[in-house]
Image: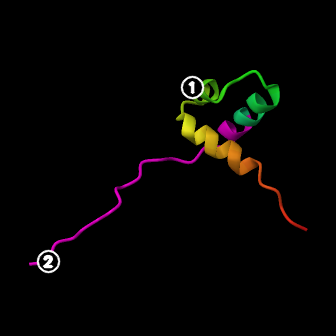
């Protein structure tokens, strides 16, 4: 008898839209919002905001 063993579950995340990314950029430049406030304003989780901000800080090598 065979049994399927899955170690991962289906993920239910969504990408941010271009409009949401623009709003996030404006809130970041303003500097008065916390990550939790940004997440509430955009209607996403705080970890999504954290990930997006971290991704935006990458530097490209010459």
x and y percentages locating residue 38 in the rendered image: 64, 28
* Residue located at (62% from left, 38% from top): 49
**Residue matched to label 2:** 2
**Residue matched to label 1:** 40
50 left or right of 3?
Answer: right
Range covered by the magenta-colored residues? 1-22
Circle nearer the N terminus (2, 1) = 2
Q: Residues within 10 Å of mark 1 (few under 14, many from 20)?
A: few
* Residue located at (69% from left, 40% from top): 21
Under circle 2, the secondary element is: loop
Rendered view: 57 above or below 19 = below
* 18 is within the stretch colored magenta: yes
In terms of depth relative to the viewer, which is nearer, 17 or 44?
Answer: 44
Outermost residue toward the left in this view: 1
Numbered mark located on residue 30 in the image? none
Under circle 1, the secondary element is: helix
51 left or right of 23?
Answer: left
Which quadrant: the C terminus?
bottom right
* Residue located at (76% from left, 32% from top): 28
Coloring scheme used = rainbow
Magenta region's main secondary structure? loop
* Residue located at (66% from left, 45% from top): 52
Q: Residues within 10 Å of mark 2 (few under 14, many from 20)?
A: few
x and y percentages locating residue 39 in the rendered image: 59, 30
* 62 is within the stretch colored magenta: no
Numbered-mark total:
2
Which quadrant: the N terminus?
bottom left
Front tag of 2 and 1: 2
């Amino acid at each position: 008898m065979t049994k399927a063993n899955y170690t991962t579950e289906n993920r239910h995340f969504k990408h941010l839209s271009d409009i949401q990314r623009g709003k996030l950029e404006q809130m970041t430049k303003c500097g008065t919002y916390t990550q939790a406030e940004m997440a509430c304003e955009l209607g996403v989780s705080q970890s999504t905001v954290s990930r997006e901000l971290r991704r935006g800080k990458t530097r490209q090598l010459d």
